[in-house]
Amino acid sequence: MNARVGISAAALACVAAAAGAAPVLIDHRDADIAQQTAAQIDRAKAALHIAYGHTSHGSQLTEGMAGLVDFANGGGKGLALPADIFAWNDGGSGGALDLHDYALCNDVGYYPDWVVCTSNYLDDPANADVNVVIWSWCGQMDDKYEAGTLTNEYLAPMAAFERDYPRVAFVYMTGHVDIWDDADNKAACAAIRAWCATNDRILYDFNDIEHHDPDGAYYEYVNDDCGVYDGAGGTETGNWAIAWQTSHVQGVDWYECSAAHSQPLNGNLKAYAAWALWCRLGADRDRDEIADAWEERHGGMERFGGGASDCDGDGLTDWEEYVQDSEPTNAGPRFAIAGLVPTNPPALEFASSTGRVYSLLGCDDLEAGSWQAVTSRPGTGAAMRLADPMALHGVRAYGVGVSVP
Ligand SMILES: [Ca+2]
Ligand SMILES: [Ca+2]
Ligand SMILES: [Ca+2]
Ligand SMILES: [Ca+2]
């Protein structure tokens, strides 16, 4: 008993290291609104308070998000979600997403203005609840790459903000495409992507979305109006967005919305990708691959972390405790098989949690150690039994595995 008390006391002081977060890379593959469930959307709305700095190109996200509300209400894309589920406003009233639009001055091309502006904003107690900061480019990304200032005026200050405001998720962006400065544009995007992927950052890949139509077709030479060219600075041969809009049904496949400098479809895709971002951040804003809702139930996101972090020092990492749904702040019960039920075929019984998948593992050769999943079922939150439908007459060893889908 004394030992248990000691472990609990140690757990109170435990703060997980911030390092080791997984990257979040949102690109054209995420520009599919049907991927998000109502539960994920609701979680994002409950968890996020977003400050967005942008000018005209960046408004494609918010204008697209505004048009999405009615499009989804009307069953566009076959969506069957509660009415107004995609609503957003400044303050998050009425169950909407809290998005402080135009909260930050100008766009991220204006250095050092954007840095000063971000600090002032986050240091203002009125904005203490803001936990996501996202900045958009307008036109300066390729110029900064060409001038050799992209690191000093963008990547390095973003990294400094991440260090100084660890409770805030900072979202990087690539800038819009630019057929008249194509080589610098592509190189700048490559630099931002490499930085985010290598250093496990959060990226909304605005540029990548503009190189793809909704079917995933890639257009190498494009301009920000979705014009397709035969080469960098070459001749315009078509427009991927207009072509797609013309061959699809408005109100069903796409919707009208303002999309500065561009076509409505581009705004649609920007909105879909934005919601993919909000849902990812809503689920795991500190990116330790442990659901934030679970961390909050057990005392807060800061207490638990990925990798070897073991808040209660009981030998199960925080991540393992999450997967098992055991107690991460004390050495209490961990996932175990309760017993063998002598049914025909025999079944293993255990306590299950929702949001987990349980697999009956079978092994016919313990020396070789070749365990295979025999059958799997989602957890019910109550006692569960798993039986081997292919039970052999010989000897087979069994275990139960648990995972988060
Ligand atoms: Ca988390
Ligand atoms: Ca955490
Ligand atoms: Ca533990
Ligand atoms: Ca534990």
Image (cartoon, grey):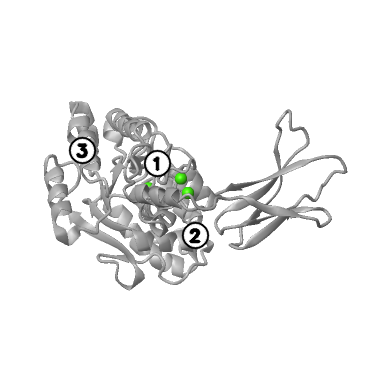
Question: Could you say where residue 98 lies in the image, as x and y percent from the top left?
Answer: 29, 63
Q: Which mark is residue 152?
A: none
Going by the numbered disc 2, the residue's amino acid type is: Thr
For the residue labelled by badge 3, is the local secondary structure a helix, a strand or a loop?
Answer: helix
- Distance from Cα at disc 2 to Cα at disc 1: 19 Å
Q: Nearer the viewer, residue 111 or 70?
A: 111
Circle on res. 37: 2
- Answer above or below: position of 365 versus 57: above
Left or right of 22: which side holds 162?
Answer: left
- Residue drawn at point x = 22 percent, y = 46 percent: 165
Q: Is residue 82 left or right of residue 110?
A: right
Residue type (three-letter) at the residue carrying disc 3:
Ala
User: Alpha carbon of mark 1 to alpha carbon of mark 3: how far?
Assistant: 20 Å
**Which amino acid, by three-letter code, is at mark 1?**
Leu
Image point (32%, 54%), residue name? 61
Q: Which mark is residue 160?
A: 3
Question: What residue is shown with label 1?
Answer: 25
Answer above or below: position of 381 versus 196. below
In terms of sequence position, does the residue under pointer 3 or pointer 2 come before the other? 2
Asked if disc 3 is less than 8 Å from ligand 2, the answer is: no
Front-lying residue, 291 or 221: 291
